[in-house]
Amino acid sequence: MKLLFLGTRGEIDAQTRRHRMHTSLLVSYGNARVMIDCGLDWLGKFERLRPDAIVLTHAHPDHAWGLKGGAPCPVYASEKTWHELQHYPIKHRHVIKERTPTKICGITFEAFPVEHSILSPAVGYRLSAGRACIFYAPDLIFIHERNAALNSVQFYIGDGATVTRSFIRKRGKALIGHSPVRTQLTWCEKEGVPRAIITHCGSEMVTGDEREISAKIRAMAAERRVDVRIAYDGMKVML
């Protein structure tokens, strides 16, 4: 399995050379290429990547609005996401059911509900192919059934909206927003995940001193016996 971080910027105005495009991951296995998420930055641009399929985590602008004009390949998403995108001219729609392994281009995707948004419910994906197994969730507060989601995972790829400060808010009894990187690294420690990659970078990372922030995150990760990296646009990982 090969990972190419096409974009690593969250839904913020700031951008840099390292974090220019909205968060998206291209997963390659054999000759197949699956794109996860296609935000507004990718509108009219993602076609040149020629993905064999596109998988969506949720329907927020920075994750799905690049498909406003349709898609030349099959698109997979949860029923709740498809309800929000019902007017998009996407011909080949496929529903991914939660906790039901679904094979897409030789890669097994299993969707786990994550807490993030009331209006645009999100999922994280456990991906496996060959000997490789990762969990990908660029927007979340917490993972439902976390133990099952992260069991035997080699890489946790998570939400970089905030490093230590909580971005969690209440809407009635529901929670919305993002958990800090520190919390996600603690999940990795508890579930025995050895490596983490942080994507969907927020203003703190994009506009701050990334060397200082990276050192801070590495120190937090070392305390939890986890190896961590901050993703950047164009970064490649081989599993």
Image: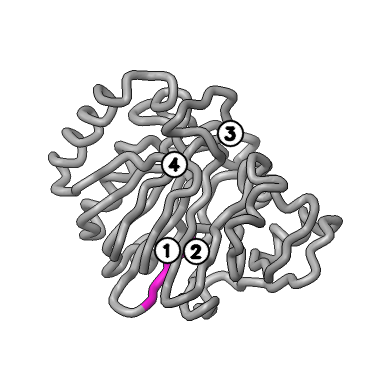
Q: Amino acid at mark 1?
A: Glu
Residue at the (42%, 45%) spot, across then down: 234
Distance from the alpha carbon under mark 3 to that under mark 4: 15 Å
Residue type at the position of mark 2: Phe
Res 121 seen here: no
- Residue 170 picture location, percent across and down: 58, 33
Of tags 1 and 3, the one toward the viewer is 3
Q: Is residue 216 above or below residue 84?
A: above
On residue 233, the disc is: 4
Q: Residues within 10 Å of mark 1 (few under 14, many from 20)?
A: few
Give the residue at mark 1: 145
Q: Earlier in the sequence, mark 1 or mark 4?
A: 1
As drawn, the label of residue 112 is: 2
The answer to whether residue 72 is magenta is no
Q: Can you say whether 102 is above or below 196 in the image?
A: below
Q: Position of residue 107 (x, y in %)?
A: 46, 76
Rendered residue at 77%/53% (across/down): 84
Residue on which the image places disc 3: 11
Disc 1 vs disc 2: Cβ atoms closer than 8 Å? yes
Dot 3 amino acid type: Glu
